[in-house]
Structures are given as structure tokens and as C-alpha cells.
């Protein structure tokens, strides 16, 4: 009897996990005024991503800022991860501590801290660039992503010993060349995984974005948050389904990249859980 | 340097060069990074901050409106874009306090052009540098406004605002849950404590929330007496809060159509909207707040630092034009203050006009809110009610 | 020199994370001078902290803590069997797919999947109708806009964050080790308690922390599913900044939130250490003494 207790429980949990997602996907085929009240089946709600400018802009803003934030997070995080793995010292403890602090700070605290600071930088300090909506969103989305990328890159490099890089140095390669030709390729799966994960996180970023955004540059989750007040329409579900497909594609790519690099399912899980 | 020395097998002469390479590359890398950051910062595409005064120039390509929920007929907005060009983005707030908080926090960088404050807040907002002066030359349709609704005491010269809509506050209840007839705020409270306990929705707006107490207890809702405010807080926190399940300033969008609550405090036009959208409008019964309630007037205004002032003025002129008022009134359910609209609305036989246009006796029971020293206390009470409701 | 590689990240994070948080802490000692200004630090005091701990607000901290603890425990109880099953019992070839199935909800937009629950739990929705039809409930489903709904929502949202680290932890306990335990006469339960759990302990702790910490600061689940009843500290902080414009009070609440989380973790760690001390002493291996 106990043999099938675990599988049955697990199956129930999986159903539980997928229930709301399936509901959203199903309701994206609802053509009606309210998301919640099923009217009739149709594909019209999907058209909203093209026909409704507010939605189209929101999705574009999300994708654009997500990509840019991911680039910045990947560059900064990769450099930091490599530095931590290859050059451990006292400073690593401090740096890891800061990364840990970022990971555990509730997003709402981040959000209420960042908005006044950006307004201060933009208005009082006169650095105009901080008044730009895109810049604000990118900064807000990059924080947690940098932590993630640093962990992942460091974890990967720490596992591989430095003999290859030493050999490269022995063969007269200047440090920069070693970096480009040896270190980076070694870390590449982690870098790519980090990039895609950052992009996914950026697409999902809601609270910080809600606080710091400037009207006109509204990302998708913030649009949904405000739609929550005035009545959710089926197009929200439809566009969410599209975004879900986009996210899944990114993740499939991450898994593929890591698998190619020889990670087992366990390692991938560890990576995905943010280290 | 590094803790683990890089061991290099090299010619003696090469060693010196190698060492300098090591330091030089590192330095270059850092310098590039730092320089990039400075460049990035310096090349600031200077955004808002410049308080541009509109003077009839060409319209910009966007317009950003921060207003109450569901407060404009969507087709009118898209018609504006088709006719004049600027794309419209609409954001919603739940209360004047939220609007002010957003503008104060952003200090001109919010990105909003048009905002819709209630009358009593117009002057305080203007005095605190949150609003731009209107250029009435760009708004010729101002002449078509009903004289009763312009030059009001809160903005005698209409320097900062033009009437958008005026309305009142009451409640609707679900006849399937509440079988008796409710007519006053006292009935509202009673139903909230009994049949509708745990199924009551109130406005997410500090003043009308406190109004429930004042209006049902015969107290002037503009009171600043500590005794009254303490009694209000005590009452709301202990007698009403435990029964509240939803705080929503626009229940017509979701709460009423979905019947998430059985007793819903709402603004008159929003209740009308909700009933129209409901599957079964007959289950809802509207009650004008009695024996007293509020009379509020919302206004078009332009935020300080608006990035698109030309489009803002053009929009205001467009939206108060007489020919589109019937469509607007039909959607939002409020009198928009333009002359001749009521007649046209009656001719068009719009539904539930008793919730849009009120008789003189009814208007006598409606009282405008004044901006008083009790403002902070009211927000405090609202906060405490929310916390008590969540307990 | 190579430390310079980490410098850009240092600077970026310092400027956009450490400094703003520092500013928040600074604000928490200030006050709100007038209606149209957000805060001022002319006078420094702990008054805002006293205000934040006043009976009305303290209630919210209590609520949040209650939801945090129960929610985490529920995640642990619900998620552990699943993680164990995937790590130990499921066919190795299927593991990747099963993990992917766990991760899909995790990487769906947080807000959207919470809205999914709002649709499911709607009083006039299909679930409510079905349950009424079967006779499980007498009237329309009443769970929305209550603390129960918030609990359901947070357990749902953070469950994958518990399952993944637990999986990694259980995976570390190798098959041969468990087999050896069985060979020595222990049944499945004993093996689980005395072999698997101790080795998986770091992962279990990681899972608990990964769930508890963000849960305490949750804002979206409480807003979407809780209505008025969902009041959690995250929302309170947000409303101080968004509507009440009282940055000083909001900052004090935010700092208190962080302190609450840190202290509760510290206390839990201490309790765990105390509770397991007799166990450790009893089962500690003493090498060289002969078994």
C-alpha cells in the first residue's frame, strides 16, 4: 500500500501545481468582457497583443528591459563570479554577504527603497538619466539577477580546477587572452544559463517595477497589476499564455545548454533553484 | 594581487614584460568599465523636469492620463487618437491621497500628463507645486460648460482645473442575500454586521469611509473635533472593520459583476456601470446614501512636469466637447457638466438616469468635502480600519 | 588585480542596493512634517518604531508571522514527499521531466498564477458550482478574500521553491547508503529518519529558508487573494508609501520586517540546535571505541 502512496501524493501535488496555469490557458480562449465569467470560445483575445496598443507596448517594454537587464546582469555577474572563483580572498566573504542580503531582502523593501533614491538621483542630483523609465526598470530588474548569475558562474568555476588556465599562462598567453580563450568558454554554460534565467526573472519582475516605473514605460506585470483593480479581461490571460510560452522556451534553452555541458538533472535543478 | 601566483615558464627577459602586461590589462579593463559608466551617465537623454507651458504648438505623439478607474468611454479615447494622433495610456488610482502620494514621491518624474483630482484637493495640490496652470486659450470648448460647474469656490478662475464629472456616493446590495429593504447608512452598517458580514465591500478612499460613520450619526463630515474623529475611529475599527472583506474604489469593474460581495459601497456612476455589466442586474438595488452623503466633483488637471502639455490641452478640449457627452455619460454614469447634456441623455433614453441626474431635494442632502486639518487623521483612521479588517 | 573584475558589480550593487536600503533605515528615524511632504529627518527619534509596533499594526506583524510559519510548514509537509519520490523512487530517466514539471509553475509569472487561483476560487465560478453540486459546501465558495485563501496562495506559489532544494538534498543520499542501512536491519522509516534526513539536512534548511523569507515579505498573494483580510506587512509598507505618504513610518515597518525575519530565523536555528542536541549526543559515532 505504501508503494503507491508516494506516487499518488506526488501526482496530486502536480495537479495542484498546474491547476491555475491550466485555468489561465483555458480562459485565454474566453471571449467576453470579464476574465472570470466564461462567455464563449474564441481566439479573439489573443489578437489583443497586436490590436491593443497598451498591451502591445507593455509586452514590448517587458521584453526590451528584460533583455537589457539580463545583459547587464550577465556581464557584471560573470565578471564577479569569475573573480570569486579564481581569486578568493577576504573580500569574497563580504561580496557573498551582499549577494545573500539581496537574495533575502523582500522585494517590497527593495521597491520602497529604490524609488526615492532614483527620484533623488534624477531630480536633486540632476542626473537626468534616472528619470528615464527604461533605465529605472533595468536597474530594478538587474539587482537580483546579478546575484543569481554570480552564484551560478562561481559555482561552475569553483568545480573546475584552475589547471587549464595555468597551462594557458605557461604557454605565454596574456591574462586577457586566457580569460577570453579559456576561462570564458569554461564558464559559458553557466553564463548562458545565467543570462536566460535573468531574462525570465526580468519578465516576471512586478513589485520593484510597479514602484519605479514611469508612465509610458509600463512593463507587462505592472499592467496586469493595474488591470486587477479595474476588472480583468480575457486578453490578460491570452497574453499571459503567450508570455508563458516565451518563458518556457527560454528555460528549455537553459536546460539544453546545461545538458550539453554535461550537467545532470540534479545540477540543473540546483542551478534553476538559484543556487 | 592574486593569492595563488601564476606560474610562468618564460625567458628571463620576458618575465618583466609579462608582469607589466598583467597589471596593464587589469588596469585597462577597469578603466574601460569605469569610463563606460561615466559615459553612460553623461549621455543622459534629459527627460522630464522642464515645466513646458503649452502654447498651441504641434501635438506630441503620446498622452498619459492618471485617473479614477473606468472613468472614460474607451471608444472616445481611441477616437481621439484617430483624430488627433497622440496615443493614450491610462493608469488608475483608488483615492486622491494615492494620486497625491504618487505625484509627491515622483516630484515631476511620474510621466503623467493629465490627472483627475477631486475639487477640494486642487488648490492644495497647486500650492504644493503638483499642478501646471491651464492655458484656457487652447480649450475653446470651455465656453460650453454649464455655468453651475465652473468657477467653483475651490478654483474660482479655473486656473488649474476644469470640471470632469460630479457625482455622489451610496451603496448597492444583493437582493438574493439581503431580503429586507435598506435605505440609510445605518441600514448599511446593520446589514454589514448581519447578513452581509464578511461579504461587505467599502470604498478604498479615506474620506467616504469615515463618512459612513459621520453620515449615519448626524455628524458633519468635515468636522475637525478630536472627539468626533476619535469616536469615528473607534466605531469603524470595532464595529465595521471586522465585517469588511474588500476595499475597492471601483467595484463596478469586478466586485459587482462578479458578486464577490453582497453589500457594496460605491460611487453612483460606478454602481450603475457594475449593475449594467452584471449577468442579472435585477439582483442589485441601488441606495443613495441617506440621510446625508457627499457631493464630489472630479476635475481635469495637468500635472507639473507633464511631458506632453500640448496633447494634454488638446485632449481636455476634445473630451468636454458637447457632441460626445451623451456617449461619455452613458458609459461613466455621471453628469459631466456640459450644457444641454441632460436633455440629450433623456431623449436618448439612457438607462438608470436616476443614478446620474439627481433632484434638488436629493442634492440638498449631498455635502462637499472640505480640505481641513483633519486630513491626516482621516488617512490614519483609514489605515487603521484596513489593518483591523485584516485581523 | 583580478578583484577588479568584481568591481563593476560591487559598484552597481552598492549604488543601487546598499545605499537605498541605507536610506530607508535613515528615513525610519524621521517623521512626517505635513500633509504634502513625505518625510523629514530634522528630528531623529525611534517614534516611528513605537508607532509601527502599536497594537493595530502589531496585529499585522502577528498575522504575517502566522501565515509565514504555517505556510512554510505546509510547504515542507506537502513538498517533501514529492521531492523524496523524485529523488529516490522515480525512474532516473524520468527525473529530468519530473523536475521540469515542478519548475514550469515556478517560472510562470507570479502575479498571473495567483490570478489563476482567483478565477478558480470565484464564488460564482465552476469549482464553487461543482462543490455545491456534490454537496461538499452549502452555499457559494466563500474562501476568497480570507486568510485561508492567502495561505492557499502562498503555499501554492512557494511550493516549487521547497521541492527543488529538497530534491537536491535527497539526491545526495546515495542509494547504496540506504541499502546498507536496510541490510543492517532498519526499516524504511528508520532509514529515512536516521540516514536520509541528517544527510539532507542542509538542503531541508535551504528549502525552509528559501520559502520562509520571501513569504514573510509577500505582497502580491495577499493583495490578489486576501482582499481586506489578507493584510500582511508587505502591503502595509506599500500602503504607507503609496497612499499614506508616510515614508518614515513605512521605512520603520520595512526595517522591522527585516528584523522580524532575521530574529525568527535565529530563534528557530537555536531551537533546532537545542532540540537535536540530545539526539546528536545519542547517535554520535564514537570511533575507536568498538561498537
Image: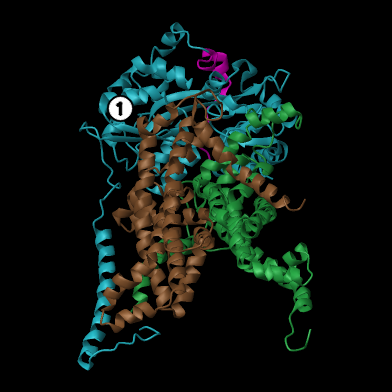
In this view, the residue in front, C55 or A49, is A49
x, y (%) of residue C60?
65, 50
Looking at the image, what colour scheme do you see?
by chain
- Tag 1 residue: B81
**Residue at 27% across, 59% down:** B40
Quarter of the view holding residue A149: bottom left
The quadrant of the rendering that contains the C terminus of chain B is top right
**Residue at 65% across, 23% down:** B173
Mark 1: secondary structure: helix
Q: Is residue B379 visible?
A: yes
Within 10 Å of the Cα at label 1, are there few (<14), some (14-19), or many (20+) other Cα atoms? Answer: some
Chain B colour?
cyan
Quarter of the view holding residue C161: bottom right
Residue B18 left/right relative to A138: left
Identify the chain drawn in green.
C
In this view, the residue in front, C249 or C230, is C230
**Residue at 79% across, 77% down:** C282
x, y (%) of residue C183?
75, 70
In this view, the residue in front, C44 or B324, is B324
Q: Is residue B366 magenta?
A: yes
The quadrant of the rendering that contains the N terminus of chain B is bottom left
Q: Is residue B354 magenta?
A: yes
Magenta-colored span? B352-374
Residue C181 left/right relative to A38: right
Chain A colour?
brown
Amino acid at each position: 500500500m505504501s508503494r503507491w502512496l508516494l506516487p499518488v501524493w506526488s501526482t496530486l501535488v502536480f495537479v495542484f501545481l498546474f491547476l491555475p496555469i491550466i485555468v489561465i490557458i483555458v480562459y485565454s480562449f474566453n471571449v467576453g468582457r470579464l476574465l472570470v465569467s466564461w462567455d464563449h470560445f474564441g481566439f479573439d483575445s489573443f489578437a489583443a497583443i497586436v490590436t491593443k496598443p497598451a498591451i502591445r507596448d507593455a509586452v514590448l517594454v517587458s521584453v526590451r528591459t528584460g533583455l537589457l537587464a539580463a545583459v547587464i546582469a550577465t556581464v557584471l555577474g560573470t565578471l564577479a563570479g569569475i573573480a570569486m572563483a579564481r581569486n578568493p580572498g577576504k573580500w569574497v566573504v563580504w561580496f557573498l554577504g551582499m549577494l545573500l542580503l539581496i537574495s533575502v531582502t523582500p522585494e517590497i523593501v527593495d521597491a520602497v527603497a529604490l524609488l526615492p533614491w532614483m527620484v533623488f538621483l534624477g531630480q536633486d542630483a540632476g542626473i537626468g538619466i534616472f528619470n528615464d523609465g527604461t533605465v529605472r526598470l533595468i536597474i530594478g530588474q538587474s539587482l537580483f539577477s546579478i546575484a543569481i548569475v554570480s552564484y551560478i558562474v562561481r559555482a561552475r568555476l569553483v568545480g573546475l580546477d584552475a589547471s587549464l588556465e595555468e597551462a594557458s599562462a605557461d604557454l605565454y598567453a596574456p591574462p586577457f587572452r586566457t580569460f577570453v580563450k579559456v576561462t570564458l568558454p569554461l564558464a559559458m554554460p553557466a553564463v548562458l544559463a545565467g543570462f536566460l534565467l535573468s531574462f525570465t526573472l526580468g519578465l516576471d519582475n512586478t513589485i520593484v517595477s510597479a514602484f519605479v516605473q514611469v508612465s509610458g514605460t509600463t512593463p507587462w506585470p505592472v499592467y496586469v497589476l493595474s488591470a486587477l483593480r479595474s476588472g480583468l479581461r480575457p486578453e490578460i490571460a491570452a497574453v499571459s499564455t503567450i508570455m508563458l510560452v516565451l518563458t518556457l522556451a527560454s528555460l528549455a534553452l537553459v536546460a539544453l545548454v546545461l545538458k550539453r555541458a554535461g550537467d545532470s538533472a540534479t545540477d540543473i535543478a540546483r542551478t534553476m533553484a538559484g543556487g | 594581487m592574486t593569492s595563488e601566483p601564476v606560474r610562468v615558464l618564460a625567458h628571463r627577459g620576458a618575465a618583466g614584460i609579462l608582469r607589466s602586461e598583467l597589471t596593464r590589462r587589469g588596469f585597462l579593463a577597469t578603466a574601460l568599465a569605469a569610463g563606460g559608466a561615466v559615459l553612460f551617465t553623461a549621455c543622459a537623454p534629459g527627460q522630464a523636469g522642464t515645466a513646458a507651458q503649452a502654447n498651441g504648438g504641434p501635438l506630441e505623439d503620446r498622452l498619459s492620463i492618471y485617473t479614477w478607474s473606468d472613468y472614460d468611454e474607451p471608444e472616445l479615447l481611441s477616437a481621439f487618437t484617430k483624430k488627433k494622433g497622440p496615443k493614450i495610456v491610462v493608469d488608475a488610482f483608488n483615492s486622491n491621497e494615492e494620486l497625491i502620494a504618487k505625484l509627491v514621491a515622483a516630484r515631476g518624474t511620474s510621466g503623467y500628463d493629465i490627472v483627475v483630482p477631486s475639487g477640494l484637493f486642487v488648490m492644495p495640490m497647486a500650492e504644493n507645486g503638483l499642478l501646471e496652470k491651464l492655458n484656457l486659450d487652447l480649450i475653446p470648448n470651455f465656453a460650453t460648460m454649464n455655468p453651475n460647474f465652473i468657477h467653483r469656490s475651490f478654483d474660482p478662475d479655473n486656473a488649474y482645473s476644469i470640471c470632469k464629472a460630479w457625482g455622489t456616493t451610496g451603496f448597492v446590495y444583493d437582493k438574493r442575500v439581503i431580503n429586507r429593504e435598506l435605505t440609510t447608512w445605518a441600514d448599511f452598517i446593520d446589514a454589514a454586521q448581519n447578513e452581509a458580514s464578511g461579504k461587505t465591500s467599502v470604498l478604498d478612499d479615506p474620506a467616504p469611509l469615515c463618512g459612513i460613520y459621520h453620515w449615519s450619526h448626524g455628524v458633519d463630515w468635515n468636522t475637525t473635533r478630536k472627539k468626533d474623529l476619535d469616536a469615528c475611529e473607534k466605531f469603524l475599527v470595532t464595529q465595521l472593520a471586522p465585517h469588511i472583506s474588500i476595499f475597492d474604489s471601483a467595484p463596478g469593474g469586478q466586485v459587482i459583476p462578479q458578486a464577490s460581495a453582497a453589500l457594496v459601497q460605491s460611487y453612483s456612476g460606478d454602481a450603475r456601470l457594475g449593475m449594467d455589466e452584471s449577468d442579472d442586474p435585477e439582483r442589485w438595488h441601488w441606495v443613495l446614501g441617506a440621510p446625508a452623503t457627499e457631493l464630489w466633483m472630479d476635475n481635469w488637471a495637468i500635472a507639473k512636469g507633464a511631458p506632453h502639455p500640448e496633447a494634454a490641452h488638446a485632449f481636455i478640449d476634445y473630451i468636454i466637447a458637447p457632441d460626445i457627452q451623451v456617449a461619455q455619460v452613458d458609459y461613466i454614469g455621471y453628469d459631466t457638466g456640459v450644457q444641454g447634456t441632460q436633455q440629450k441623455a433623456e431623449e436618448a433614453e439612457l438607462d438608470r438616469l436616476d443614478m446620474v441626474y439627481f433632484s434638488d431635494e436629493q442634492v440638498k442632502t449631498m455635502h462637499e468635502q472640505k480640505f481641513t486639518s483633519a486630513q491626516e487623521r482621516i488617512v490614519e483612521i483609514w489605515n487603521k480600519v484596513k489593518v483591523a479588517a485584516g485581523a | 588585480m583580478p578583484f577588479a573584475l568584481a568591481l563593476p558589480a560591487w559598484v552597481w550593487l552598492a549604488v543601487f542596493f546598499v545605499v537605498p536600503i541605507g536610506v530607508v533605515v535613515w528615513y525610519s528615524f524621521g517623521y512626517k512634517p505635513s500633509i504634502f511632504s513625505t518625510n523629514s529627518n530634522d528630528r531623529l527619534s525611534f517614534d516611528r518604531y513605537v508607532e509601527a509596533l502599536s497594537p493595530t499594526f502589531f496585529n499585522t506583524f502577528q498575522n504575517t508571522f502566522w501565515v509565514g510559519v504555517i505556510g512554510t510548514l505546509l510547504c515542507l509537509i506537502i513538498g517533501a514527499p514529492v521531492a523524496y519520490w523524485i529523488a529516490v523512487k522515480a525512474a532516473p530517466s524520468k527525473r529530468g521531466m519530473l523536475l521540469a514539471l515542478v519548475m514550469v509553475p515556478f517560472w510562470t509569472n507570479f502575479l498571473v498564477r495567483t490570478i489563476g487561483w482567483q478565477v478558480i476560487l470565484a464564488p460564482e465560478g465552476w469549482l464553487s458550482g461543482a462543490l455545491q453540486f456534490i454537496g461538499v459546501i452549502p452555499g457559494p465558495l466563500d474562501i476568497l478574500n480570507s486568510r485561508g485563501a492567502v495561505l492557499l496562495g502562498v503555499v501554492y506559489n512557494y511550493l516549487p521553491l521547497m521541492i527543488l532544494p529538497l530534491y537536491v538534498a535527497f539526491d545526495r543520499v546515495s542509494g547504496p547508503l540506504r541499502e546498507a542501512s536496510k541490510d543492517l536491519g532498519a526499516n524504511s522509516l528508520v532509514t529515512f529518519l536516521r540516514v536520509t534526513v541528517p544527510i539532507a539536512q542542509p538542503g531541508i534548511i535551504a528549502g525552509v529558508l528559501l520559502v520562509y523569507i520571501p513569504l514573510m515579505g509577500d505582497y502580491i498573494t495577499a493583495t490578489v487573494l486576501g482582499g481586506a483580510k489578507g493584510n500582511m506587512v508587505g502591503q502595509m509598507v506599500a500602503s504607507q508609501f503609496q497612499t499614506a505618504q508616510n515614508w518614515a513610518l513605512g521605512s520603520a515597518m520595512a526595517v522591522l520586517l527585516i528584523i522580524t525575519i532575521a530574529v525568527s530565523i535565529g530563534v528557530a536555528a537555536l531551537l533546532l540546535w537545542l532540540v537535536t542536541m540530545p539526539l546528536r549526543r545519542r547517535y554520535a559515532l564514537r570511533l575507536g571505541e568498538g561498537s
